Amino acid sequence: MLFSKWTVYQAAALAGLIALAFLAEFYSLNIGNALTSGAISSMLIVLTFILLSTSLIHLFFVFHSKKSERFLSHPLWNKMNVLSGLLLAFSVAAFIIVSVFTSLNDWIMEGRWILYGILYFFLFLYSLFVLSIVHKVKQDSAKETKIEMSFGATVVSLCVLLFLL
């Protein structure tokens, strides 16, 4: 069935991501003031945005697992950790090349939606990569359990990564 209630929920999760980007853009001046006020408040704002974005991405995964019986059970998922890792590495390399050889910074300054699109794209790829690793490690667990574990691992690893930066 193409338009089940889970499809509507997935659309709501995507709408939530768009609304989060609009909300972040609407309060960007206040966020900018908080970023200049200190490292703790800026880190909390960034972590809150990433937590909310990652939550909505994983909600999308949960709704897709309810909608599709083949999600996390297709034979391709046995190789997905390598495929998604390569796709993530290729995307990071392409982003670096584009940012060095084009005026990406100017494009982002003119249209901030590009920044949110790039951020959501990388968060989605990273979440997919972590989910594929959890799927490979915990093959006997239920789909929802794998998605919950990957959500926790994604949030913790992103927090550690931001802390190290």
Image (cartoon, grey):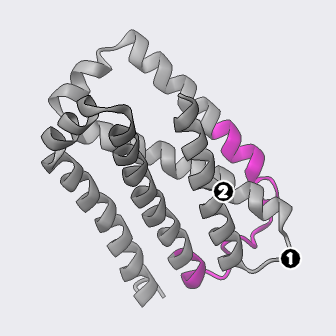
Q: Nearer the viewer, residue 156 or 119?
A: 156
In terms of image quadrants, where is residue 39? top left
Mark 2: amino acid: Ala
User: What is the x, y in percent for residue 126?
Assistant: 58, 47
- 79 horizontally vs 17: left or right: right
Q: Is residue 98 above or below residue 72?
A: above
- 155 horizontally vs 73: left or right: left
User: What is the x, y in percent for residue 107?
Assistant: 23, 25
Q: Is residue 78 magenta?
A: yes
Question: Pointer 1: residues within 10 angstroms few (<14), some, or many (20+)?
Answer: few
Residue that lies at the very extreme toward the top in this rendered image? 101
Q: Is residue 81 visible?
A: yes
In terms of image quadrants, where is residue 100? top left
Q: Residue at x 69, y 41 (%)?
A: 85
Mark 1: amino acid: Asp
- Secondary element at tag 1: loop
The span picked out in magenta is 64-87
Question: Marks 1 and 2, how far apart in space?
Answer: 18 Å
Q: Is residue 127 above or below residue 121?
A: below
User: What is the x, y in percent for residue 54?
Assistant: 48, 58
Q: Residue at x 41, y 57 (%)?
A: 53
Q: Is residue 88 above or below residue 137?
A: above
Dot 1 or dot 2, earlier in sequence: 1
User: What is the x, y in percent for residue 132?
Assistant: 72, 57
Q: Is residue 30 magenta?
A: no
Task: From the image, tell me which residue sits under label 1.
Answer: 140
In terms of image quadrants, where is residue 14? bottom left
**Residue 153, labelled with which disc?**
2
**Residue 52, labelled with which disc?**
none
Disc nearest the viewer among 1 and 2: 2
Most frequent secondary structure within the magenta stretch: helix
